Amino acid sequence: MSPLEKTPAGGEGLAAWLTLLQARSVVVDALETDLAMPLGWFEVLIQLTSAPEGRLKMQQLAHSVLLSKSGLTRLVDRMAEAGLVTRAPCPTDRRAIYAIVTPAGRAALRKALPTHNESLDEHFSNVLTPAELAGLRASLGKILDAANFNAPPCPTNLPATNAPKQRARV
């Protein structure tokens, strides 16, 4: 019997939380194994490619990818060294810096999207029914709402890919 099966009455919250963390870890590990780049890079490229003019202020980007400002700075530094992003000062606010996706970054994202989609399907989407996916999204949305978390919208204007199998993402 696992520790989760021994959960005392009223401990369902802890059991659900641990299961969520474990499931996230399993899916993230699988995605990172399948992608040809760190998952954090993929997330940054999706957010920047989906943003107007392919740019976001660093603070907005940190919020979108759920990293601290210092964590995002280190991540963007590594991506800039790889030629996937650049930085530019904001013309209206000297304190703000933009992260901007480069043509090489767009190409890397286009190349990674089919693999990401297939991996996400294999390790997450296809494991659940459409009703379970909708329920999971609704349940997690309630948690975000209770925390007054203003989640950035799911990117929908991603670059086209030549993936043989594409499903619409909500």
Image (cartoon, rainbow, N blue to C red):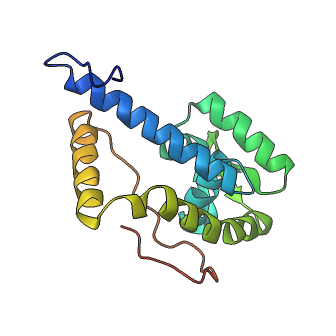
Which residue: 53% across, 80% down?
Answer: 165
**Residue 50, placed above or below residue 37:** below
Which residue: 51% across, 62% down?
Answer: 122
**Residue 31, placed above or below residue 97:** below
Q: Nearer the viewer, residue 85 or 32?
A: 32
Q: Where is residue 117 in the image (x, y as percent from the top left)?
A: 55, 67
Q: Which of 30 and 35 is in front in this view?
A: 30
Give the quarter of the image for residue 149: top left
Which residue: 44% across, 40% down?
Answer: 23
**Residue 56, placed above or below residue 54:** above
**Residue 15, placed above or below residue 111:** above
Q: Is residue 60 visible?
A: no
Q: Position of residue 96 (x, y in %)?
A: 62, 41
The extreme front residue here reads: 1
Left or right for 60, reference 109: left
Q: Where is residue 118 in the image (x, y as percent from the top left)?
A: 56, 67
Quarter of the N terminus within the rendering: top left
